[in-house]
Amino acid sequence: MNKIFQSLFILIIPLGNVFAAEKFADSHIHYNWDHRKETSSEEVVEILKQHNVGLTIVAGTPSELALELREKGGDWIIPFFSPYIHELGKRDWYLDEQVVKDAEQGLKDGLYYGIGEVHFMNGFKPKTDNRIFLQLIALAEEYQVPMMIHIDSGNEITFQKLCQANPKLRMIFAHAGGNLRPDHIEKILNSCDNVWVDFAARDPWRYDGISKPDHTLLPEWKKLVLKYPDRFITGTDPVWKVTRWSTWDTDDEGWTHYQKLYDYHWAWLNDLPADVRKKIAWQNTQILLKR
Ligand SMILES: [Zn+2]
């Protein structure tokens, strides 16, 4: 090996190791019935371990699949109670009193460490004044656990009202980078200290919206992240049936794409200053979960 090549080699290897060794809090994953047909819970745990995931927030459909993952993996897997308590629960959870009963029992038994993900889609039912949802908020406050909420609306007002009305409730604003632009998100961060923002599923293969072709953050998002480094978290969210190549009646192959989702998030994380990167990749989730 000639000298130049040797020094390059020495330089490259440790850098690679630093990144590879860094722990990742994958703060938004799902393990659903249609994943399970494709990838077993043991395989999911193995994938997470291989990628040095030291902490992960998981929601299942039905909800108890998140518990199965923790049972197989250990206490670094943090199950949230999903209001989707049966395979098609996403369609009717907001009408189903059983959701509240199951949530209360699961929290009382110490099985769940949060509630969510709950989706509110523009133009669809339910709205955030839904009776079941309000009861879930009350339970989250009673048991002092965070909630993961995905609100797809044209402006920040719906979410802002929610976080201002419940200042003691820790809330995750899931999937930032959609309709709400950085200036909307900034209003939420500014008015609610109890909110963390996640960039799950904003990779170019699904919803996109936060990054450039080289997978680093768009300038306006990077600026916001650097201004509020304590308030961002991220996750891979390996749900693949949202892509145009998938149909609703097939099994979800999402976990087989984990590597590229993981690489995508590290691409933009590695473009940030080291202290900010560590906060978003690891520390902020610890604080959010009060670990
Ligand atoms: Zn999700």
Image (cartoon, rainbow, N blue to C red):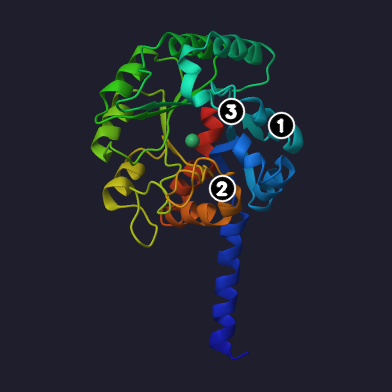
Instruction: Identify the residue at the far bottom of this view.
Output: 2
Quarter-of-image position of residue 101: top right
Disc 1 versus disc 2: nearer the observer: 2
Q: Residues within 10 Å of mark 3 (few under 14, many from 20)?
A: some
At a point 38% along the width and 56% down the height, the residue shown is 216
Give whichever of discs 1 and 2 has the lower sequence position: 1
Looking at the image, residue 269 lies above or below residue 237: below
Disc 1 versus disc 3: nearer the observer: 3
Give the Cα distance between marks 3 and 2: 17 Å
Q: Residues within 10 Å of mark 1 (few under 14, many from 20)?
A: some
- Specify the quadrant that holds the N terminus: bottom right
Quarter-of-image position of residue 226: top left
Looking at the image, residue 89 lies above or below residue 141: below
Q: Amino acid at mark 2?
A: Gly
Q: Which residue is mark 1?
A: 68
Looking at the image, residue 226 lies above or below residue 80: below
Q: Amino acid at mark 1?
A: Glu
SS category of the residue bearing label 3? loop
286 or 201, which is in the foreground?
201
Give the Cα distance between marks 1 and 3: 16 Å
At a point 53% along the width and 30% down the height, the residue shown is 287
Q: Which residue is mark 3?
A: 87
Q: Give the percent coordinates (x, y) of residue 14.
A: 60, 67
Give whichever of discs 1 and 3 has the lower sequence position: 1
Q: Residues within 10 Å of mark 2 (few under 14, many from 20)?
A: many
Q: Give the percent coordinates (x, y) of residue 171.
A: 44, 24
Q: What label does residue 254 carry, if any?
A: 2
Quarter-of-image position of residue 26: top right
Q: Give the percent coordinates (x, y) of residue 163.
A: 36, 19
